[in-house]
Image: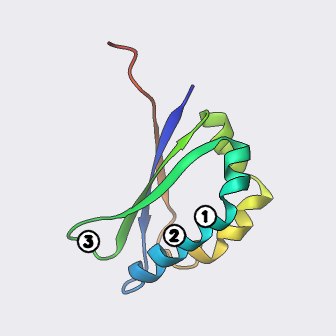
């Protein structure tokens, strides 16, 4: 089942623009591998009123596909992003409701 992941990032003070630039550089560089693993999209947003926060909304083929890549060696390519964080990221997985 397709899921979206809402990942919240608390970034070291004054480093959000750098975080966003790096995110927007790394994702396209590695998107073929991400797509092969089940990622449909990944977009970063900045939080209004909080210069030290950003949010990524990504869409995955399944929760298992996302979990598999998060545990894989492929995540090493994103290590420079994590160095800019002031706290571990938080992720919430959501899916469409069955109610129509």
- What kind of element bears circle 1? helix
- Between 24 and 86, the residue placed more toward the observer is 24
Question: Residue 100's quadrant in the figure?
Answer: top left
Q: For this view, does 15 lie left or right of residue 2?
A: left
Inter-mark Cα distance, 1 to 3: 26 Å
Inter-mark Cα distance, 2 to 3: 19 Å
Q: For this view, does 59 lie left or right of residue 31?
A: left
Q: Position of residue 22 (x, y in %)?
A: 54, 76
* Colour logic: rainbow
Residue highlighted by disc 1:
28
Find the residue positioned furthest to the left: 49
- Circles 1 and 2, Cβ within 8 Å, touching? The answer is yes
Between circles 2 and 3, the one closer to the viewer is 2
Residue neighbourhood size for the residue with mark 2, other residues' Cα within 10 Å, grouped as few (<14), some (14–19), many (≥20): some
Find the residue positioned furthest to the right: 73
Image quarter hosting the N terminus: top right
Residue neighbourhood size for the residue with mark 1, other residues' Cα within 10 Å, grouped as few (<14), some (14–19), many (≥20): few
**Residue 28 visible in the picture:** yes
- In the rendering, which numbered label is found on residue 50? 3
Find the residue positioned furthest to the top: 100
**Residue 70 visible in the picture:** no
Q: For this view, does 65 lie left or right of residue 9?
A: right
Inter-mark Cα distance, 1 to 2: 7 Å
| Vertical position of residue 77 compared to residue 74: above or below | below
**Quick one: label 1 or label 3, which is nearer the N terminus?**
1
**Quick one: label 2 or label 3, which is nearer the N terminus?**
2
Residue highlighted by disc 2:
24
Q: Position of residue 73 (x, y in %)?
A: 79, 60
């Amino acid at each position: 089942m397709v899921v979206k992941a809402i990942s919240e990032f608390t970034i070291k003070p004054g480093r959000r623009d750098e975080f966003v630039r790096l995110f927007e550089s790394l994702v396209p560089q590695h998107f073929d591998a991400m797509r092969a693993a089940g990622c449909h999209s990944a977009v970063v947003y900045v939080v209004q009123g909080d210069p030290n926060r950003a949010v990524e909304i990504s869409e995955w083929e399944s929760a298992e596909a996302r979990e598999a890549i998060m545990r894989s060696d492929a995540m090493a390519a994103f290590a420079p992003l994590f160095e800019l964080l002031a706290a571990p990221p938080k992720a919430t997985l959501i899916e469409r409701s069955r109610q129509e």
